[in-house]
């Protein structure tokens, strides 16, 4: 419980450090405030099933976000698209 609270506070603080405009700041705050409100409701209602579902959804979200970030970051570095492009440019139509 304490670890999750620390994680959420750290996330809020780190997001606010990189914000560039009021719109981004609002988006960052809402991105944390909405799930935090849902988690707070499960704590208030002593809903163990809701807490399990929150942990599952939050963990899945973090996992998929990081996988997609690294995939998008690594694909251009592997130059898979450039290799395909160079091969297709070498074939000239008759």
Image (cartoon, rainbow, N blue to C red):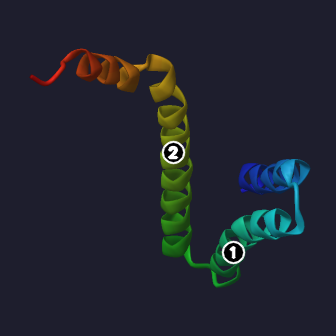
Quick check: marks 1 and 2 in contact, CB under 8 Å?
no
Give the crowd class for mark 1: few <14, some 14-19, many >=20 residues within 10 Å: few
* Nearer-the-camera pick, 41 or 69: 69
Q: Is residue 63 above or below residue 61?
A: above
Q: Position of residue 59 (x, y in %)?
A: 53, 52
Q: Residue at x 50, y 61 (%)?
A: 57
Give the crowd class for mark 2: few <14, some 14-19, many >=20 residues within 10 Å: few
Which image quadrant: the C terminus? top left
> Outermost residue toward the left?
94
> Outermost residue toward the front?
94
* Nearer-the-camera pick, 89 or 55: 89
Label drawn at residue 3:
none
> Outermost residue toward the bottom?
45
Q: Is residue 79 left or right of residue 32?
A: left
Q: Is residue 90 left or right of residue 28?
A: left
Label 1 to label 2: alpha-carbon separation: 19 Å
User: Residue 48's image quarter?
Assistant: bottom right
Q: Earlier in the sequence, mark 1 or mark 2?
A: 1
Q: Residue at x 71, y 56 (%)?
A: 1
Q: Is residue 79 above or below residue 16?
A: above
User: Residue 44's image quarter?
Assistant: bottom right
What residue did someone put label 2 on?
A: 63
Query: Is label 2 in a helix, a strand or a loop?
Result: helix
Query: Is label 1 in a helix, a strand or a loop?
Result: helix
Q: Position of residue 42 (x, y in %)?
A: 63, 77
Q: Residue at x 88, y 52 (%)?
A: 13
Q: Position of residue 72 (x, y in %)?
A: 50, 36
Q: Is residue 14 left or right of residue 27?
A: right
Label drawn at residue 34:
1
* Nearer-the-camera pick, 42 or 22: 22
Q: Position of residue 32 (x, y in %)?
A: 73, 65
Q: Residue at x 76, y 50 (%)?
A: 7
């Amino acid at each position: 419980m304490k670890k999750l609270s620390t994680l959420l506070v750290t996330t809020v603080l780190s997001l606010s450090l990189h914000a560039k405009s009021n719109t981004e700041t609002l988006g960052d705050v809402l991105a944390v405030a909405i799930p935090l409100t849902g988690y707070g409701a499960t704590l208030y209602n002593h809903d163990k099933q809701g807490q399990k579902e929150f942990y599952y959804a939050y963990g899945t979200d973090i996992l998929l976000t990081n996988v997609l970030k690294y995939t998008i970051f690594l694909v251009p570095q592997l130059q898979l698209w450039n290799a395909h492009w160079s091969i297709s440019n070498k074939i000239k139509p008759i």
